[in-house]
Amino acid sequence: MVSDETFFAWLDGELGPGEAARVAAEVEADPELAAKAERHRALRARLTQGFGTIVDAPVPEQILTAAARPAGAEVVDFAAARGSRETRWRSVPQWAAIAATLAIGIFVGTMVPRHDSAPVALEDGKVYAAAALSDALDTELASDPSSGGVRINLTFRDQSGAICRSFTQAAASGLACRDKERWQLRGLFAAPEGQGGAYRMAAGMDPNLAALVTSTMAGEPFDGAREKAARDTGWR
Amino acid sequence: MPSSIVFDDELVALLPRLRRFAYALSRTPADADDLTQATVERALRSRGQWQPGTRLDSWLYRIMRNLWIDTVRARGRKDKVEAPAAEADRLGEDPREAMDASVDLARMMAAMQRLPDEQREVVALILVEGFGYRETAEMLGVPIGTVSSRLVRGRTALLDLVGV
């Protein structure tokens, strides 16, 4: 006779191979035990399925914001912070956290985390590219392989004459336009659920971003030569 | 890579699982989300206490479990008899989610609430979160035999409640 503890340990895969085989044989020979095993497997399946909806659901904005903004002030070692820029940028979760706090549509940025190396910074109610995103917008050409996880897509002028660039990252894509010496974000869009990583990079432009680009662009997107010339003259 | 970076990114990556554990422990979705947020805030304040190289998930689960115990104790016995409010409508974060799954979640939460606290946490950690008996014993600071016997009682009662 198998004790309850041993029976469930077997069901949960907690027994060593010898003992597991012994219990398995006993369960097989006893219809009542076999039925009990089935019922408990079904119970576990229902628990997994029911609570699994939470894992699949988007994490609420409030929680993401809490996670993206350290509660205590941190003392940051500048050398370490500089060194970590790229690694931090490459990591999808932080991007996902920021992008997921944004509504689908044009970003009106009130929830920007105040990380030292966050890819965006909030100033006077405007959202600017920071850290590695700013670097990529400043220096990268569409023909370059993505650096620091950022790929530049289109470069063009908006109706006011400012240069704008669209960009893609594993978990988000967006549009930034030149505002004096900086890149102001006009839109930032989270990658659709389940389309992170390489798929995202390989896929076409996010439809929301495409709509924003279309409504912002005056004239044609820059070709490679024009893009390079614009970079070399400081995006004026 | 600096440990603080690992910490931040892993914390965000672990949020869906932590939130699931909160739902398994809590009476209502609102309580569960409050618990998750409180856990995140506590974890960020106490980040210096996490030993890089050890499992961040276990550390976070322990924080959540301790906060939950505090809440349970603070609430006391008086409202324990109240039936958990049906807040199934709040679960529909994504309206495309299958209705069945949301309904089943509400049912599972209600059933979990009927278990004694010490059985509920063991059922949540092992049957919902998939931790092993030993990991669970270490997280809760109890002998593995205690985990095993609480699990037997908890899952047996749960089976009667949901009637699989």
Image (spheres, rainbow, N blue to C red):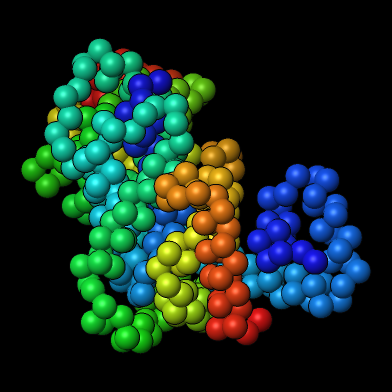
- Judging depth in this view, the residue of A192 and B127 nearest the camera is B127
Residue A163 drawn above or below residue B124: above
Residue at the extreme right of the image, as rendered: A29
Is residue B82 left or right of A144 when viewed as pictured?
left
* Percent x, y of residue A229: 35, 18
Q: Is residue A10 visible?
A: yes
Residue A134 drawn above or below residue B160: above
Name the residue: 35% across, 75% down: B28
Q: Is residue A140 visible?
A: no
- Judging depth in this view, the residue of A227 and A165 nearest the camera is A165
* Percent x, y of residue A200: 54, 43
Is residue A77 left or right of A170 when viewed as pictured?
left
User: Which quadrant of the figure has residue A211?
Assistant: bottom left
- Judging depth in this view, the residue of A154 and B124 nearest the camera is B124
Residue A115 drawn above or below residue A99: above
Quarter of the image for the N terminus of chain A: give it. bottom right
* Percent x, y of residue A220: 40, 39
* Percent x, y of residue A204: 55, 46
Residue at the extreme front of the image, as rendered: A1
